[in-house]
Image (tube, helix red, strand yellow):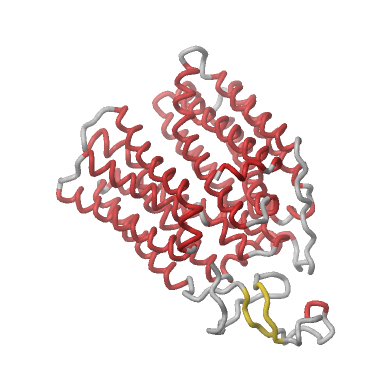
Amino acid sequence: MLSVLRNRTYRHLFTAQVVALVGTGLATVALSLLAYDIAGGNASAVLGTALAVKMVAYVGIAPLISAFADRIPRRALLVTMDLTRAGVALALPFVTQVWQVYVLIFLLQAASAVFTPTFQATIPEVLPDEDDYTHALSLSRLAYDLESLFSPVLAAALLSLISYNWLFTGTAVGFLASGALVVSVLLPKPQPQPVERTGGVYARAAFGARLFLATPRLRALLALDLVAAAVGAMVLVNTVVLVRDTLGRSAGDVSLALAAYGAGSMVVALLLPRVVGRLGDRTLMLPAAFVMTTTLGLLAAGLGAGGLSWPALLAAWLVIGAATSAILTPGGRLLRRSAAAPDLPAAFAAQFSLTHACWLITYPLAGRLASQAGLTVSAAVLTALALAAAVTAVRLWPRQDPAELEHVHTELAPDHPHLAGAGGRSHRHDFHIDALHQRWPVREPAREKTAA
């Protein structure tokens, strides 16, 4: 897996991702302490609103910037977003009002909503080989999981020496280091559209979502993202209540439970390049959705019967973490297969936005149900939602999913450049939704070879 780091450009980009993630982790801890200083007992409400602001920025900004992504040099865009995030981090220690926190958080997360999909869309072009790209996806998953474990420990160590305001400085340093690493390499230029998309800014911004909704495997991916969000919300929102109130264990055990979730994810990320090459994406991702749904259902049954134990919770979170990684990590492979190179930024921006829309639904659902109806009801409802999404994914993702599809262009003139050398209006090639291919072919010939 580490062999992919021999590529200098990717090595610098991956390092930029890691240091930015560490900076973000420090900011998360510092923001909690800042909210407590400003709002006191209302700190939870402030942080909850800040999380909602973050999700709104993620859902709304990413598709908008995709309308212009092919016109802006990627390196300039990424560095500008890193500088913006560093500036916001340096400003946070000086806020005195809650509304100022919300404004700065929106700016910070809006910059992240631009940076992350652009960064993700760049990696497939830096690593054109599919095996290398799969290794990169696994490394990225590992980076996210390790950050969730390492950043709180680092923050705790730093807080024993300095005040929390200095953590924001560490955050800014992380973003500045990320920008410097991006500057140090040459990135692929945005590829021009072979056929310019029609419509204004809104139509261009909506293209990524339309690509998702028109591509069967991407519709299935969206359903799988909802599975991960429904089950993951139970883990991330309700673990503290499960550990402290239901099981009566210490605050330190909350971290252990979340560590089990992260450990499961990391194990699968390490194994993924070898496993996905043998099984294929569909064979790996769909069963994983049912595994995590079944695990949460068993947890709900255990809660209802009053039989949940500490080892059972750890085992459940380990399995759910592993299944989550099996769903989320290969997602980039599906996007790469489903979009032409010029449309990758729009595809990744749409996935970023739509995935966080799923979390925007499941986060408050998990919390509200747990507080008003109890943990058993919360787990049961989220299980039902995840099961419905998993079944939908199976129905949406065809068993025969070839890369090349036979299709007919009745709308094009015989001398259109797209038909040159194609043997007429009826032809086949790697099929992607774009300006010339607005709809997915209704029938897929049985003779086609299924894509890996």
User: Viewed as shown, does residue 195 lie left or right of 426?
Assistant: right
Give the residue at the far right of this rendering.
Answer: 415
Report the front residue among 385 and 161.
Answer: 161
Looking at the image, residue 348 sits to the left or right of residue 153; the answer is: right
Question: Eyeballing the image, is 236 above or below 133?
Answer: above
Residue plotted at (65% across, 39% down): 11
**Closest to the observer, 369 or 279:** 279
Horizontal side, residue 24 vs residue 233: left or right = right
User: Residue 78 sits in which quadrant?
Assistant: top right
**Residue at x 59% of width, y 23% of height:** 170
Image location (x, y in percent) of residue 70? 76, 55
Q: How many marks?
A: 0
The residue nearer to you, when weighing 352 against 287, is 287
Q: Is residue 238 above or below residue 304?
A: above
Q: Quadrant of the N terminus?
A: top right
* Residue 443 is at least partly visible in this image: no
Residue 415 seen in render: yes
Compared to residue 195, the image places residue 3 above or below, namely above
Image point (18%, 50%), residue name: 304
Q: Residue furthest top?
A: 161
Residue 12 in picture, x, y percent from top left:
68, 37
- Image-quadrant location for residue 434: bottom right
Q: Residue at x 82, y 81 (%)?
A: 416
The picture places residue 145, in percent across and down from the top left corner, at 47, 39
Query: 60 or 309, which lies in front?
Result: 309
